[in-house]
Every structure is written in C-alpha cells, then in structure tokens.
Image (cartoon, rainbow, N blue to C red):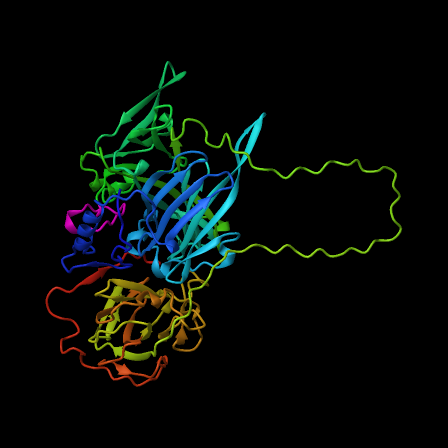
Amino acid sequence: MRAWNHFSLSPTRALRAAIAAGTLARVAIGAWYFVLKETRLLAQSDVNCSSPNQIDATTPTGARWEMCWEHRFNEGIVLRDITFTPPGGPRRKVLAQANLAQIHVPYDDNAVRFHDLSDFGLGDVRMAALAPEDCPNGTLLAYNGKPVLCQQQQPRGYAYKHPDSQLQGYVLSLFSVSHVGAYNYISMWKFYDDGAIEPQIGATGKLQRLGDDPAFGWPLRDNVYGISHTHNYYWRLDFDLAGAENDLVEEIEFTPVNANTQYVISVTPLATEAARPVEPTRMRSWRVRDSVVTNSDNHPISYQLDPLRSGHRHLGPDTEPFTYNEFYVTAYKPCEQWASHNPTAGGCGDNLATFVDGESTASDVVVWYGISFHHLTRDEDETYMDVHWDGFQLLPRDWNATNPLDSVSIAQTPRPTNTPAPTNTPAPTTTPTQTPVPPTPTATATFTPPPPTATPAIACFVYSSSDADQDLSIGASSATSYLAVPDSIRVSDIRLHVRMAHSWTGDVSMVLAHEPSGRAVMAMDRPGVSASYWGCSRDDIDVILDDEAASPVENQCAATRPTAYGRFRPNGPLATFQGIDGQGRWLLTLLDASPAVDQGTLEEWSIQICTADTGGLAGQPVGSNEPFDLGDVIPVPVDHDGSPPRPDGPVQTYELFLPAIMR
C-alpha cells in the first residue's frame, strides 16, 4: 500500500530539451523519487483524499465503488485507492493507482513518431473544460475550478439472463477529454456492479496529417491522402488486492492437443519481471492474485486481465522495444511512470523494455498493458472523426464464492395490462383538439462553480529579441531566435508579436518555448492548411498572437501583403505559460515545411507578459493589461541582463518531435 502526495510529475515538454552534444535531457525528479520512497512505506487501508477528490458511488443493485482522483500534467486524470464492495460482500481494495501511461503514435511514412503523454501531456491546458452537455445525467468534478471529469451512473443492460430470472445491471463511468494536436482523446474508466473494471480510450477530433503519397494512406480527395498511423495506448495498473503488497501474477493459456480437439489449461506463475505478447491462438490472459486472502470456497481472490482487442499489433523499430510486447509485469518503482520516454534521472529506465530486468515480483507488482489501433483513414473521417474506442477488461476471478448479484432484487415497474381494442368503432367526424404535452427537460450535469475571488491589478511588460535577424533560406528547415527576460515575473497572461517575410506563409510554423520551465506551444501552424493541403500561398506575416483574439491565425490568407496582419488567436494556447516564472531565455523556433522551395527571414519578435506583481521589473511597460498593438514603438535592448543573447559554450537546443506537416 502507498500513501500518495497530491502533486504532479514535473511537466515534460512539447519540445524535449536536448543538450548540444545530442543527449536528451530528462526531467530531474531525484527529490520526487525520495519523497515517494518514504511515503510509500506508510500503511494506508482506506480511501484517503479530501471530499472534492473523492468518489463514492453505490449502484441500484447495491454494489459500491470508492476511489480518489487527481490531476497531473502528463497523465491527465489518475485514479487511486480503488475499492469495491459487492452486494452483501466484503469491502476490499483492488488498485492503489490506475492511469494511462503513454499514447504512442507512429505514422506509416515514418515522418514522425509521437509520444503524446510524455512529450505533450494530457492535463493542464490540454485537458478540456467540460460543459453540462458533455456529461448528460452526470456530475462534473473540478480541478482548480475547471470542470475536467464527468461522473455518470447508467444502466448497462443485462447483468444476467435466464429463463427463470434476469437482472438489469449498472455501471459507474468516469471520463476526461484531452486535446493533443488535432486529436481529442477521451480517457474513460468503467466500473461495473459485478466488480469488472474496463479502461477505455476514444480517439476523435480531426485528422492530424495529410499527404500526397498513396503508399502510406487512403485517398480523401484529389491527390490528398490521409496518412495511416497507429495509436499504441498503454496503461499502468498498480495492484494492491485487499490492500496489501502480497500479490502474485500468473499467466493463463490453453494448449491444443489431439489434433486441436482438446485444449489443456496451464497456469504459470511469473515470479520475476516479465514482458509477454498477446497470443490469441492460445487464449492467453493474465491474473493478479492475492497470496493470502481467499473467498469462502478457499480460492485466492484475484483480478484477470482479459485482452479483448488484439486484432492489431504494432512492432516498431529497435529504438522502440516497448512495442514488442503488450503485457508487462514489474516490481514497483516510483520512478517507472511511463511506457516510453520515461524520465531517466536516478538511473531509471527509459521505457518498459528496460524496466524488465529480472527483479522478483513477489511483493508489490505493477502491471502494464498496451493496445494497438491502426488507423486507416476514410472519407468519413472528415471533417470530424467518429470516436474510435479501444480498451480491455479487468474481471474479478474468485473475488466472491458465487455471483454477488444473484440475490439482488430491484423493484420493477409493472407492465400495463393489454386491453383489447374495440372493433368496428366508427372514426370521429371531427378532429379532437390535442393538448400539447410539454417536453421533458433533458437532464444535464451538475456543476457548482467555486466562489469568485478578488482579481488583482494587472500590469503588462514587453520584452523584445535582439537576436531576431534569422534566415529560413533555401534548404533550411528551421531557425531559432532567442529572447532574454531578466525579471522574475509571474505570468498571468502572455502575447506574442512576430514579423517576418516569407514567400509562402502556408509553409511556416512557429514554436514558442520557455527554456527554464521546459514549456512550449505551437503558436502558429501553417496558415491556410485547413482550406488547402499546401496552405496559404501568399507572402509575409505581421501578427500579434493573443488567446483572447476573435479569429484564429490558421485561417489567415488575405490578398494584401502581409497576408497575415493583425491580432489573432494562436493554434496552441499561450495559456500554457500561465503561472510560471517568466525569467530566463525564451526561444522562437521557425519551421519550414518546404525548405527546398521557399524562403524567408524573421525580422522582429517580442512577448508581452502581464502580471499582478509589478515591483522592480525592467521590461518596457505598456499599460494596465492592455494588449500591445502593431506599430507600437518598443525599444529593443542590446541585452537585458548584460550577457550576449547567444552565450558561448554549450547551448541548450530543442529536439522537435514534429513532422513536415506539423503537429
């Protein structure tokens, strides 16, 4: 069992930092490691969280589910201390923690291989604020005043059916929505009244990448192909059956004998860490069982992982060995958090394959499970893709001696007695006046907003780059400019001004990054691509990007020059930087999707940071929370802090996990 602090892992980046020598820098989590190492030793037998983060639901059939939930930057929603009480049965813990551990998206043309959870994150600004219509007949749960989790309890159809009896069952569902690139991921957990748990994920939104090569996609319209790709989903399941760290893992499969006329069962303990593939021909599954607690039939209580979907398998290159197996069991280590791109501070492994190193799993086990969905695009994927669901089940095996729902009886509304209709009744000669029946209102989710707080006075300051003269010449696919902020300034709001010349603006993307915090956002992503695969063909950009602007920058392609001129909403939210200390070096990286054809030059860029703390700041003030305007005269210092904008020695750069058609 573990006691958990309410904190998130340090946010990894949309752009992952790499040192000049090329070695990827991981998030420093040494202090975090030792905190968890100590806190996990504390015994904890019950659901342990404050009421806003506690879920306690009982179905009409009498089953009870209890758990805690928390928000994290990378994983999104994390569930803890999941406890189940069957009707008339004992209350037992099932899982200490359960969460998504990676969304790996390699494209068939190998132009890009995304790791969405680790490199972009599912929480924070990428987690959608849900509205009541997103959660019909449910309750919205909030993080920092933002409704992010929908809780619903719904009929699920038959719990069982027999000529002698039947019972309608119920399910508790929890889901959140994360927006990553063009995709929306719906992360859902279903908890059934028979004790089953079903993790699911739905992929929807818009297609991320289009191309013109028929070898790697499906035709959508003339000479435009949706590029095929795979979604590899991974979950992390930290079992604590009955609330103790004495769980064992077994593999169950069936071997055909006698010319496939018989199948012989085998149950093999996995006493050490293991990596195992699915094997449909042997009906392979796995179970986690308690080594002490039994049911009244003296059978060890357990949960079985039923693979369900195994029609697609993605085997990646040697650099992605975690894709070679679907099922992993490891000994609990607090630093092993993600299936790939795992932080390596403190000697932790980079991915699941490196986690498996022969340690005993005799006490505290963590199960990892992955599912592959190969997405072959189709016409119906435009404009918005239907939700495609993937998932698996965790089934109680011998948790009870009999079906706990057998004794459940729910009062049913009696059916109306059929009254024979009269015969030979003449039709009325006049049409009776009908009294309109008022429509039954549709139930919506309940959400109580937090009480308003006083808004502090806000002042804004502009910091300009003295390093802007950067060329995207023929053959150059990227260029980076730097800007120094000498002040310790808490970011309440931020705006970005960019002026550049370019002969085909639809090729240009811009990434704004803050080096000390590691946060980054795709501020502009190929204007005009939504209307044309090749983007806007016109020249030059002079824009202020502002989250509060009315129109998106991606739609700008005016016949005048510059083709994008004015104040627009960025592709990615600049609110990504809210709350950080803006001091230090900022980077603006320009990306050219067609470097062999067109060229351009970055001429000027600056950022406006608004803050409630205005004491002793060196930036150029521009008024109280007033957006700066095109044409403002902003002095450009030689440097703010007395050091050259590009210091000598090793320079921290960013490795861009972005394709030619940018995320």
Q: Is residue 604 covered in magenta?
A: no
Give the position of the C terminus as an image quadrant.
bottom left
**Quarter the N terminus occupies:** top left
Q: Main secondary structure of the magenta part?
A: loop
Position of residue 492 relative to residue 653, above or below, is: below
**Residue 113 visible at all:** no
Q: Quadrant of residue 627?
A: bottom left
Magenta stretch: includes residue 343: yes
**What number of labels is visible?**
0
Residue at left offset 39%, top offset 47%: 228
The answer to whether 199 is drawn above or below residue 133 in the figure is above
Query: Can residue 655 be spotted in the picture?
Result: yes
Residue 292 falls in image quadrant: top left
User: Which residue sits furthest left?
Assistant: 649
**Residue 5, x across and y down, in percent:** 26, 53
The one nearer the camera, 355 or 259, is: 355
Q: Nearer the viewer, residue 642 or 565?
A: 642
Q: Residue at x 36, y 69 (%)?
A: 504
Q: Residue 595: percent from the left, percent from the top? A: 29, 63
Span colored in magenta: 334-350
The residue lying toward the viewer, choosing from 292 and 536, is 292
Query: Whole-percent x and y of residue 53?
Result: 37, 53
In-image side of 472 versus 436 (left or right):
left
Write the residue at 40% across / 63% down: 145
Q: Position of residue 475 (x, y in %)?
A: 26, 64
Quadrant of res 120:
bottom left
Q: Residue furthest bottom?
A: 633
